[in-house]
């Protein structure tokens, strides 16, 4: 990660400059990007949240973005989720290109190198990529920053709330058609290291090291007409180090699976995703403990002209193999979004969320209002 | 959703007076030396949605698109894929920002597209059929208005 550079204002300026329609003739380096300006607040609620008392947030609160500690409370704020990304693609030969994507966030304005990889086209159907990429964990994981693409203001954190979202490694992808079914499949392997994770800081642990080693995964996406189905499996060995208290250190073996099915019938569309991951502690004070995390998201939308309305339900559970050591959790979340397409590349959305935890220890609820302007350029 | 259709028809009726009398057919073109003689809508869609990199002959395709906000582009993608231009933008944004495929190059207007296809043996583009009278390019599909 590139750090210690506050480039959010700079990227915003570049983004605005590039938003003007420009057509370049056969560019050697193509610059493009996206931004999302998102504002919101917790309207009311009683939810303490799965977060300890924190000087930056006054609960009731709502964690919209776990990886970047994007949290709303009772004060209207643009900080938790607003972001901008710039991508540069340099085509070196007909088959070889290099790509870099830098993002900055209002909540964390230091530049983050999300993507930096080389692509080699092995054949018309096969690609090899080496470098730093997003982990293609669930359906929207590797383009979760590009708000124009999906109907929510922000993705359901019940499925997309992960501490690690990138990896350094290698991937191979094949894209082909079998009859009238389009098949897009990949395998990937690598590792990731996070220093002073904002995810862990949201739980009060400021100076940490998180490692995901031996990441190995694969996905297959099938498209036939209006139906797209994607399945993914991934495993990794994770290690957590608390630099302030070694007693908190632990290691885990993580396995995750997901299946998404999307049906787009022009006016009506359905987006669904089922995910499950299991983490077994392989070292540390809770060795042997397994936490199984099933999560589901189901949404239905209707689009008419420039307008789209979208209703979504999602649920996240943590089921512990020993509830006396770690209690089970159960979060549920309903959102209603209205989207207006200002232009093909820019949309305005308004979303209300109701998020609740019916069981102890964090029982309560929060109602949230968010508005957004998303654009690609 | 019958009521929304009725509402749409009522609201859209006045716009008929403003609609152009006729829209031109769209011609999908390749270089004259390209061995491909004809393409189906589905084959064109696969090239323009990044699902295929080659012509049926195996030759790599250099796909060029019209200007991002050009109305002919909306018609073209609706015809070959059924997708609105907003859906196409979302579709390509996913592929582009996840590094899967880079979208076709956008060129402003028929003359720029024609010139590109004339100069590049692997090129494919689309133009208004009324502007097409050029022995150096070949029409492989016509999308009727």
Image: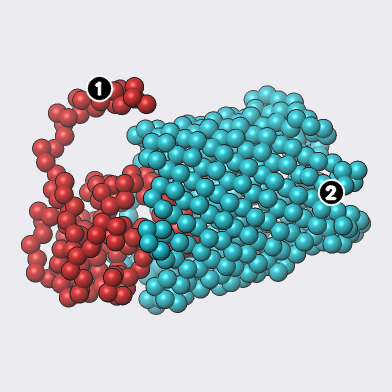
Q: Identify which residue is drawn at 47% across, 35% down.
A: A301
Q: Quadrant of residue A361?
A: top right
Q: Which tint is chain B?
A: red
Q: Can you see residue B51? A: no
Residue A134 pos. (x, y %):
58, 60
Residue A153 pos. (x, y %):
53, 38
Secondary structure under the numbered disc 2 in the rendered image: loop
Subunit bearing disc 2: A
Mark 1 packing: few (<14 Cα in 10 Å), some, or many (20+)? few
Residue A282 pos. (x, y %):
84, 62
Tell me the tag on residue B10.
1
Q: Is residue A152 above or below residue A120?
A: above
| Frontmost residue, B14 versus A98 | B14
Mark 2 packing: few (<14 Cα in 10 Å), some, or many (20+)? some
Horizontal side, residue A74 vs residue B35: left or right? right
Residue under label 2, please give it. A321
Q: Identify which residue is drawn at 58% across, 51% down.
A: A259
Residue B90 pos. (x, y %):
42, 49
Q: Identify which residue is drawn at 64% across, 29% down.
A: A354
- For the N terminus of chain A, the quadrant is bottom right
Q: Which tint is chain A?
A: cyan
Q: Quadrant of residue B22?
A: top left
Q: Quadrant of residue B31?
A: bottom left
Secondary structure under the numbered disc 1 in the rendered image: helix
Subunit bearing disc 1: B
Q: Is residue A21 above or below residue B17?
A: below
Q: How many marks?
A: 2
Q: Is residue B51 above or below residue A97?
A: above
Q: Identify which residue is drawn at 47% across, 72% down.
A: A127
Q: Can you see residue B20? A: yes
Horizontal side, residue A284 vs residue B130: left or right? right
């Amino acid at each position: 990660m590139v750090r210690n550079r506050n480039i959010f204002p700079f990227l915003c300026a570049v983004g605005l400059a590039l938003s003007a329609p420009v057509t370049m003739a056969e560019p050697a380096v193509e610059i493009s990007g996206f931004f999302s300006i998102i504002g919101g607040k917790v309207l009311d609620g009683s939810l303490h949240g799965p977060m300890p008392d924190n000087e930056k947030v006054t609960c009731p609160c709502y964690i919209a973005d776990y990886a970047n500690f994007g949290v709303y409370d009772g004060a209207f704020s643009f900080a938790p989720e607003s972001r901008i990304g710039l991508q540069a693609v340099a085509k070196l030969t007909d088959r070889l290109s290099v790509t870099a994507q830098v993002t900055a966030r209002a909540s964390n304005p230091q530049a983050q190198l999300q993507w930096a990889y080389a692509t080699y086209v092995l054949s018309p159907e096969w690609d090899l990529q080496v470098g730093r990429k997003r982990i293609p964990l669930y359906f929207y994981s590797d383009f979760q920053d590009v708000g124009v693409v999906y109907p929510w203001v922000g993705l359901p954190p019940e499925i997309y709330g992960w501490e690690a979202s990138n990896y350094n490694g290698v991937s191979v992808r094949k894209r082909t058609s079998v009859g009238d079914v389009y098949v897009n499949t990949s395998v990937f392997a690598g590792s990731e290291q996070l220093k002073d994770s904002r995810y862990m800081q949201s739980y009060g642990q400021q100076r940490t090291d998180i490692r995901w080693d031996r990441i190995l995964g694969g996905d297959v996406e099938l498209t036939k007409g209006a139906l797209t189905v994607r399945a993914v499996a991934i495993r990794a060995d994770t290690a957590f180090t608390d630099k302030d208290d070694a007693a908190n250190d632990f290691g885990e073996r993580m396995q995750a699976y997901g299946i998404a099915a999307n049906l787009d019938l022009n006016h009506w569309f359905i987006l669904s995703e089922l995910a499950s991951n299991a983490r077994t502690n392989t070292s540390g004070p809770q060795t042997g403990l397994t936490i199984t995390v099933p999560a589901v998201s189901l949404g239905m939308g209707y689009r008419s002209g420039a307008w789209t309305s979208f209703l979504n339900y999602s649920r996240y559970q943590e089921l512990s193999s020993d509830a006396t050591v770690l209690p089970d959790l159960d979060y549920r979340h309903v959102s209603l979004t209205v989207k207006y397409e200002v232009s093909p590349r820019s949309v305005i959305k308004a979303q209300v969320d109701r998020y609740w935890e019916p069981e102890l220890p964090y029982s309560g609820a929060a109602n949230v209002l968010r508005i957004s302007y998303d654009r690609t350029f | 959703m019958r009521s929304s259709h009725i509402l749409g028809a009522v609201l859209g009726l006045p716009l008929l007076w403003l609609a152009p009398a006729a829209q031109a057919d769209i011609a999908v073109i390749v270089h004259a030396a390209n061995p491909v003689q004809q393409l189906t809508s589905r084959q064109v869609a696969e090239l323009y949605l990044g699902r295929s990199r080659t012509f049926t002959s195996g030759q790599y395709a250099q796909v060029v698109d019209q200007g991002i906000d050009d109305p002919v582009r909306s018609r073209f993608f609706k015809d070959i894929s059924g997708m609105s231009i907003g859906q196409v933008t979302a579709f390509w944004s996913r592929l582009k920002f996840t590094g899967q495929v880079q979208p076709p190059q956008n060129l402003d207007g028929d003359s720029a597209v024609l010139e590109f296809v004339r100069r590049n043996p692997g090129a494919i583009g689309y133009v208004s059929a009324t502007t097409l009278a050029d022995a150096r390019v070949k029409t492989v599909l016509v999308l009727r208005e």
